[in-house]
Amino acid sequence: MALQDLTPQLRTRLSRMERAVGLFVVIAAGLLLFGFGYYIYTTAERKGWFKTKAPFFAFTDRATGLKVGDPVKLMGLDVGEISKIEPMEPENFQYNMYVEFELKDPYYGYIWTQGSRAKVTTADLLGKRVLEVTKGTGGYPAYVFHPLKALPLNEAQSLPDSTKTTLQLAEEIHADGTNLFIQALTPLSKIDLNQLARFKIQNLLVLDTTQKKGTMTAVWNDHQGAYESYKSKPYWLLSEESAAVTERLETLVGEVEKALPNILGLTNQLITVLSNSASLTSNLNAVALNARPVVSNLAAATANLDHPGALGEWLLPTNVNRQLETTLAGANATLATANTNLTALAENLERSLDNIANLTSNLNSQVQSNTNLVSAIDQAIVHTDELVQGLKHHWLLRSAFKTKPTNAAPTAPTQPLLSPKEKDKRKP
């Protein structure tokens, strides 16, 4: 039916309905666009699309368990993701895989030149691995956000102190080319610029801390020891890689296969030992059965040991027992007498020692009281010796002190003198 065939009332209602449907479609489309935009915004915020990202790269032996888009961990948190995994050139024999990843703001600030590493560790038992970075412990931040510029030394010397405080050195300065003289990030106000002139340094790399950009302005170069302008060149993190679980399992299976022959040999030896033990127990059972009468006889014999005529009386008769008692009693009496005699002897010896001690003490007191006693005895000995020497020389007593002569050795007989003719005759 054509629209002109409708009554004016129906036409009015239909136009109102069309406007309501159109308004509903517009509102639904607006809500749909709003929901889609909000989803995109939350997704971008969750994934860090609006945040600054700093690129890093590391080298690994293999890409097992890693793929593009995997999260990067820092202290247990997801702080970035892997952006590129590529093999190195065939002629590069030092490194195998190039792994590039990005860290979101503010987590890239934890990466410093000292202590920061890229670790590839095992994530599960199915061969999955995860890339984890460690927090730096010193050195310099990998990226800076202050403008980097070269400043002539003569111009730096003419700057006011307030300006020097806001400028930081962006490189390390070495004395004689080897020893570190000034560290990077040192304010110019704390540097003796005249001393740098003596090192023949003409230009300085400095960072202007009064300005901070939203993106990285410079990246640290470990080889040059200075910051260089950031041109999408990632910072290199040294890697520490652990083998995947599958490789470890393969190694473990190989070791088990090598050890299986020894284990089988050990089981064979255990079987032999068990069989020998079973034979031994069976033999011990037979020995126990054979020894049962002997044990019963010993039990019967030991049960009668406390009765007269038992085994004790067989070994030691009553007369021998009495003689032993008599002998022991005599020995006891002898020991008592000897003890008494020894006690008396010790008392007498103690008295003798006391007398000797008194005698020596009296002699010592006499010597101490009469100091001329020793000299008098010495003179008496000397006079006695002179008297004896005088008696030896007296004519009346000289013969009493003569010594008897000893037998002298016999002298050789003298040969008579002979004429030459007699000598020739006597020659044989």
Image: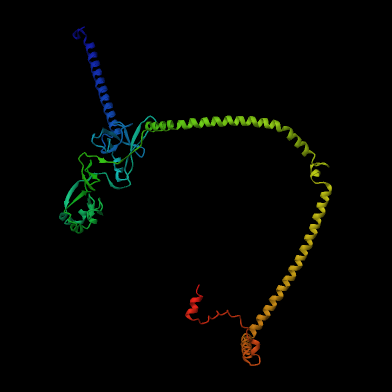
Q: How is the image coloured?
A: rainbow
Q: Quadrant of the N terminus?
A: top left
Place of residue 210 in the rendered image (x, y in percent of width and height, measured from the top left):
22, 48
Place of residue 12 in the rendered image (x, y in percent of width and height, measured from the top left):
22, 14
Q: Nearer the viewer, residue 264 or 58?
A: 264
Q: Residue at coordinates 80% horizontally, 46% vertically from top-left?
A: 316
Q: Residue at coordinates 23% horizontally, 16% vertically from top-left?
A: 18
Q: Residue at coordinates 64% horizontally, 93% vertically from top-left?
A: 395
Place of residue 251 in the rendered image (x, y in percent of width and height, measured from the top left):
39, 33
- Please tell me whether residue 30 is drawn above or below residue 210 in the rendered image: above
- Please tell me whether residue 247 is drawn above or below residue 16 in the rendered image: below
Q: Nearer the viewer, residue 25 or 51?
A: 51
Dividing the picture into quadrants, the one containing residue 90 is top left
Res. 318 visible in picture:
yes
Dividing the picture into quadrants, the one containing residue 189 is bottom left
Asked whether, in this view, residue 162 is left or right of residue 124, the answer is left
Q: Nearer the viewer, residue 137 or 39?
A: 137
Q: Residue at coordinates 60% horizontally, 29% vertically from top-left?
A: 278
Asked whether, in this view, residue 329 is left or right of residue 150, the answer is right
- Please tell me whether residue 378 is drawn above or below residue 257 in the rendered image: below
Q: How many marks?
A: 0
Place of residue 62 in the rendered image (x, y in percent of width and height, measured from the top left):
31, 34
Res. 106 visible in picture:
no
- Please tell me whether residue 381 is drawn above or below residue 122 in the rendered image: below
Q: Nearer the viewer, residue 81 or 259?
A: 259
